[in-house]
Image (cartoon, rainbow, N blue to C red):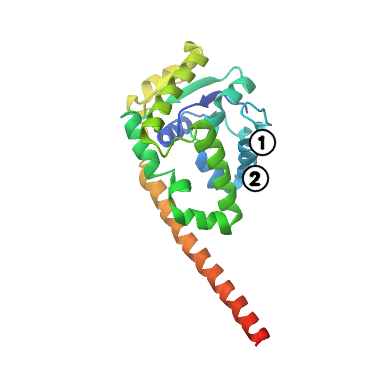
Amino acid sequence: MTLELIGAGFGRTGTWSTFAALNRLGLPCYHMQEVIMNKANKGHLDFWRKVANSPPGSQHDWNRVFANYTATVDNPGCCVWKELLAAYPDAKVLLTLHPRGAEAWYESTIDTIYFTENVWQFKILEWLTPFGWKFGDMSRKLIWGRTLDGVMNDRAKAVARYNTYIDEVKAAVPPHRLLVYKVTEGWGPLCDFLGVALPNEPFPNLNDRETIKKIIRDIIKGSYIMLGLAVAAALVVFAALWWWLG
């Protein structure tokens, strides 16, 4: 397979519903959930961490992660849309936008996927687990640092970055190869852009905010377990030392 559609839209712009829609249209689609939830993709997080620690614009063996996909949306693929466009020059570009604008995108992002930066329990996982420090490092450098310019803690700057980014994509991609799209527009524009038939079913409307928040709750539970195990291990070591020295 080769990438036919490159999603440039930020996470939290309807990318989960778009992911489901593209799969329904016969375009196997890549999404952050393919990195962290698909057991068949072991090693993908290491790949994206390497990307995050390489200079912007670097080319990589993209087929290592996209071999089984013809489309990508959401992070981390959107963070390297320029590199992917150079690697797959015949691909089209899909720029998803939040249906309610930049301010709503910001609120949704802070409330969900920014947990790697603003939820202290995730820091415990970073300290104590390989997954935690790899995912935290990749997210901090590639998503929040490089793509969003490190401005997420400043609402006004983050909103400005969102709007500037839209202009950057529009300026870089020829109009006939670009679809600027909101999931509230449904199947029509997407199917027209891809040249495929309209499905006889409603457009996916996934409640991904609740799903993500459930994942975050599970991560928090895991962090408490890891912290408890670490404290217990420290107490065992302390007791052994106390006994030996006594």
- Mark number for residue 214? none
Between 86 and 145, the residue placed more toward the observer is 145
Q: Residues within 10 Å of mark 1 (few under 14, many from 20)?
A: few
Percent of width and height locating residue 238: 60, 77
Between 101 and 159, the residue placed more toward the observer is 159
The reply to whether discs 2 and 1 touch (Cβ–Cβ < 8 Å) is yes
What kind of residue is marked 1? Arg
Q: Vertically, is 7 above or below 44? A: above
Task: Single out the residue that lies furthest toward the bottom.
Answer: 246
Answer whether residue 28 is visible to the viewer in this image: no
Q: Vertically, is 209 above or below 55? A: below
Rendered residue at 48%/54% (across/down): 122
Q: Earlier in the sequence, mark 2 or mark 1?
A: 2
Q: Tell me: 17 left or right of 87.
A: left
Q: How many discs appear?
A: 2
Percent of width and height locating residue 33: 50, 42
Q: Vertically, is 14 above or below 214? A: above
Q: Residues within 10 Å of mark 2 (few under 14, many from 20)?
A: few
What kind of residue is marked 2? Gly
Rendered residue at 51%/31% (across/down): 147
Percent of width and height locating residue 85: 58, 21
Rendered residue at 53%/56% (across/down): 125
Quadrant assignment, res 3: top right
Answer whether residue 174 is visible to the viewer in this image: yes
| Residue highlighted by disc 2 | 43
Percent of width and height locating residue 151: 45, 35
Question: Where is the N terminus found, in terms of image quarters?
Answer: top right
Between 203 and 100, the residue placed more toward the observer is 100
| Residue highlighted by disc 1 | 64
Q: Vertically, is 123 above or below 58? A: below
